[in-house]
Amino acid sequence: MKFKSELGLPLAAGSIAALGWAGPDWLSFLLTLAFAKGLVVLGVVLQMRAGLVSFGQALYYCIGGYAAGLAAKHLGIQDAIVLLALGVVASLMMAALCGIMVARYRDIFYAMLSMALSMIVYGMLVKSSALGSTDGFNVANPSYLGFQPDPSQAKRVAFLVTLAIALVAALVCHRVLRSRFGWLSEAVRENEIRVDFLGISPFGLVYLNYCGAAVLSALGGGLIAIATGHVDPDMAFWATSGEFVFMALLGGTAHVAAPFVAAIVFSAVRTFAIQEAPHLWQLTLGSVLLALILFLPKGLWSLVSRRRAAVPAEIPSVTKEVSP
C-alpha cells in the first residue's frame, strides 16, 4: 500500500502539471495558489494528527513570505530557491523559540496561544511603515537556479516549481507519518500519559511537529510571495489561519494528498463565487463548504476511502480434489 500511494503522488502531480501548463493562465495561477496554501494546510494536518489544532499557522506563512520578499528587496537576492530557503530558516528559528512555550500546552490553550503569537506579528507589521504598513510591498519576479524565465511564462514556471515542492513535501510527510515518529505522534493524541510512561517525551514530539509545520508554512508563504509578487500583513491575520484550519477539516487528515485536494476545491469555489456573485460571495462560499462538511464530516478524502472500502478483496479460489 505504501508503494502504491507513493507512486500515485508523482503520477497525479504529472497529470496536474500537464493540465496547468496546457490550460489558460488563470488555471495555472489558481493551482499555484492552491498548492502553496496546501503546504500550509499540510502543516496543520501534521499537528491535527497529534491531536493539536493551530489557529496561528499564518504566523509562519507570513514569516516565509516576508523573509523572501525582504531578501529580494534589500539584499538583492533574485534566486527563488535561496529566497525560499531564507524564509524556511527564519520561520524555523521563530518556531524553535516559540515552540518551547507553545508545545507545553494542549487543546484550546494551544490553539489560542498560537493565534496570539500570530496576531502580535500582525500588529507589528501593520504599525511598521518601513515594511509598507497595511499595504505591504511588492516582490520582483525571481530567477530559478540561474534561469530567468520570460515574463510571459513566469507564472507558469512558478506553478511548476510550486507543484514540485508540494510533491516532495507530500512524499516526505507520507514517510514521516508512517514512521515511528508518526505513530508516536498519533499516540500523543490518543493517550499522552502512556507515551510518557514508555519513556518518550510528549513535549519533544509536539515540539518537532510544531517546527515541521512551521517549515511547511514558510514554504507556502514564500511561494505565495513569488507567485503573486506581493506580501502584506493580512498573511498573519487570524482569519488566514482560520482559512487553513477550515481547509484541513474540508480535506480530512487521512492522507497527505487531502490538504491539496481541499485547497484546490476551496480556491475554485471561492473564485467561482466571487465571479458569479461578487456581493454575496462569502455567503455562497460558506453555503457550499458547509454542505460539503455536513455530508462529508470526515473530509473530501473520505470519498476515496469509501471507494476503496467498497471494492471487495479478491478471494483466492480453493479447489478441492476428490478422489475417484
Image (spheres, grey):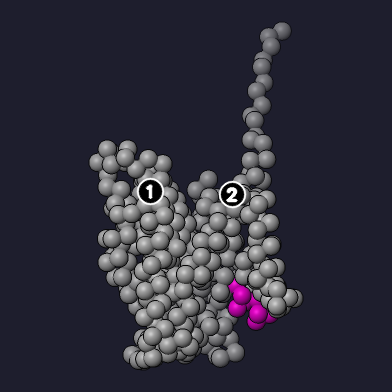
Q: Position of residue 96 (x, y in %)?
A: 28, 65
Depth-wise, is mark 1 or mark 2 nearer the camera?
2
- The image quadrant that residue 74 belongs to is bottom left
* Disc 1: CA contacts within 10 A as few (<14), some (14-19) or many (>=20): many
Residue at 52 percent of width and 52 percent of height: 253
Q: Is residue 176 above or below residue 323?
A: below
Report how far apart the C-alphas of labels 1 and 2 lie in the structure. 20 Å
Please indicate whether residue 97 sits to the left or right of residue 46 in the image. left
Q: Circle 2 sits in a helix, a strand or a loop, which is it?
A: loop
**Location of residue 83 in the rendering, given as x and y in whole percent from the top left corner:** 39, 81
Q: Of 145 and 72, which appears nearest the observer?
A: 72
Q: Quadrant of the C terminus?
A: top right
Specify which label sits upstream in the sequence, 1 or 2. Answer: 1
> Mainly helix, strand or loop, the magenta region?
helix
Q: Tell me which amino acid carries mark 1.
A: Ser
In terms of depth relative to the viewer, which is nearer, 287 or 144?
287
The residue sitting at the top extreme is 324
Q: Which SS class for mark 1?
A: helix
Q: Which residues are magenta?
A: 23-31
Judging by the rendered image, the residue that carries numbered circle 2 is 298
Seen in the picture, residue 233 relative to 292 is either above or below; the reply is below
Q: Which residue is mark 1?
A: 185
- Residue at image point 53% right, 50% down: 254
Residue 235: image location, x then y, percent: 47, 76
